[in-house]
Image (cartoon, helix red, strand yellow):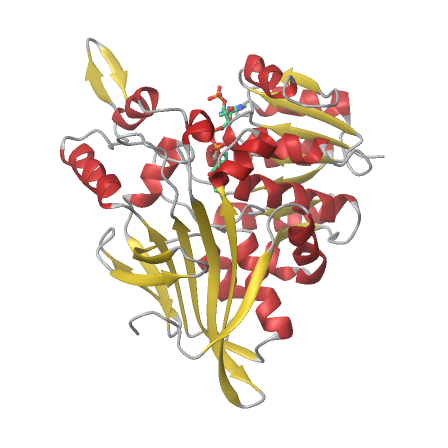
Amino acid sequence: MSKVIIVGAGGVGGVVTHKCAQLPEVFTDIILASRNEEKCKAIAAQLPRAIRTAQVDADNVAQMTALLEAEKPDLVINVALPYQDLPIMDACLAAGIDYLDTANYEPPEEAKFEYSWQWAYQDKFKNANIMALLGSGFDPGVTNVYTAYIKKHYLDEIHELDIIDCNAGDHGQPFATNFNPEINIREVTAKGRFWENGQWVETDPLSVKDSYDFPEGIGPKDIYLMYHEELESITKHFPEIKRARFWMTFSQNYLKHLEVLQNVGMTGIEPVVYEGKEIIPLQFLKAVLPDPSSLGPLTKGRTCIGCVAKGIKDGKEKIVYIYNICDHEKCYEEVQSQAISYTTGVPAMIGAKMILEGKWKASGVWNMEQFDPDPFMNDLNQYGLPWQVVELDATGLTD
Ligand SMILES: NC(=O)c1ccc[n+]([C@@H]2O[C@H](COP(=O)([O-])OP(=O)(O)OC[C@H]3O[C@@H](n4cnc5c(N)ncnc54)[C@H](OP(=O)(O)O)[C@@H]3O)[C@@H](O)[C@H]2O)c1
């Protein structure tokens, strides 16, 4: 018997709800709550079993706490936006409920994300005897678990880690983002950063480019170095790592549109006055771009996200690549959503399952790589995100 409240009825929220609903033996009672309850009801109507819905403004700690106290769930799955992480964690503390999310906290007024704000809850969560599992999506999330799995089974020491995220799919739209446009554009237009020899090296946005030949017929694609939050926790928890980088593919079409939008000021997050009213250009842009959840029926092709790790096993150099390939159309057939939301929503369900089954259970604030990767990796194979491990002769990157 377990009850969960899922917060956020967007692209990822839809997938988590579908996946939890598929496992009634684990998720006996599901409540989907969001700012706009109509969106929750629309998702509920797609499901083969009944769930409940609720309206909540998760920025309002008192309102969120009241919902938790009334329902007394075992766990909150936060798939609203990164801005809501801290208010929802505060509500979980007030009501004594475990917490899980897929993206680390980001203040609305500054395009900056880091774990310090959520790691600062460590003592409070420990003292309250509740847990928070941070970043249980794909990247962060599965990429952290892949790293822990490589360390447990393949390498005695990891020296270099390259996380490579490829979306080889096409939605046929002139310009659209595959998850929340505001969060996506803030991330992509930020400076790049990678870890090298004990310090962060900063790069201009999308200024470092390489090419990677993706497996299983996907083929070569341009990849761009970005900063991504799992680099912060992975380099903390595996201090032997000398270099850690994150790469993502972008089409020339996406980059061209982004450049124009940036040049004309549409990606800014400072308010501008328009007809006597303050508006934030990026929020206005989000309002005119396609809703990512509308891309489900349109997107074809596959994603390939994985970790290339170079290190030492029994005194010899070894390179290991673990990856998942996910097909946009198959995801849509199963849960009415494209693969970007699917690859985030499935690990959120599995992270929740780990907590509810007691496989990953400890009070305090945790990142994914701190737990035993094996049960999570088994569930990835079982619930829609099967992975492959290959040993490589070379990393496939330029250096
Ligand atoms: N780790 C990963 O691999 C990964 C990958 C992709 C995305 N993510 C994360 O997943 C999360 C969800 O992304 P998404 O693409 O599903 O975004 P989305 O489609 O924009 O959905 C966000 C949902 O949260 C709701 N919401 C926003 N503010 C709220 C508030 N104050 N109270 C209650 N509900 C609120 C929104 O309500 P409205 O409908 O009213 O706006 C919307 O339903 C984001 O945090 C994103 O960063 C993680």
Q: Nearer the viewer, residue 269 or 310?
A: 310
Task: Examine the rendered structure and indicate whether residue 323 appears above or below residue 80.
Answer: below
Farthest residue, direction front: 217
- Nearest the eye: 67 or 351: 351
Mark yes or no: residue 232 visible: no
Report whether 125 appears left or right of 25.
left
Q: Position of residue 242 (x, y in %)?
A: 42, 75
Q: Quadrant of the C terminus?
A: bottom left
Q: Position of residue 360 (x, y in %)?
A: 73, 53
Instruction: Give how far across and how far down residue 340 sits, in percent.
Output: 47, 40
Q: Is residue 237 left or right of residue 188?
A: right
Quadrant in which the N terminus appears: top right
| Residue 44 visible here | yes
Q: Quadrant of residue 64?
A: top right
- Residue 265 picture location, percent across and down: 17, 31
Q: Residue at x 60, y 21 (%)?
A: 43
Q: Name above or below for residue 349 compared with residue 41.
A: below
User: In this view of the protein, which residue sits in the foreground, 310 or 103?
Assistant: 310
Count of all numbered marks drawn on residues in the image: 0
Rendered residue at 77%/43% (across/down): 356
Residue at 25 percent across and 32 percent down: it is 267
The answer to whether 149 is drawn above or below residue 9 in the figure is below
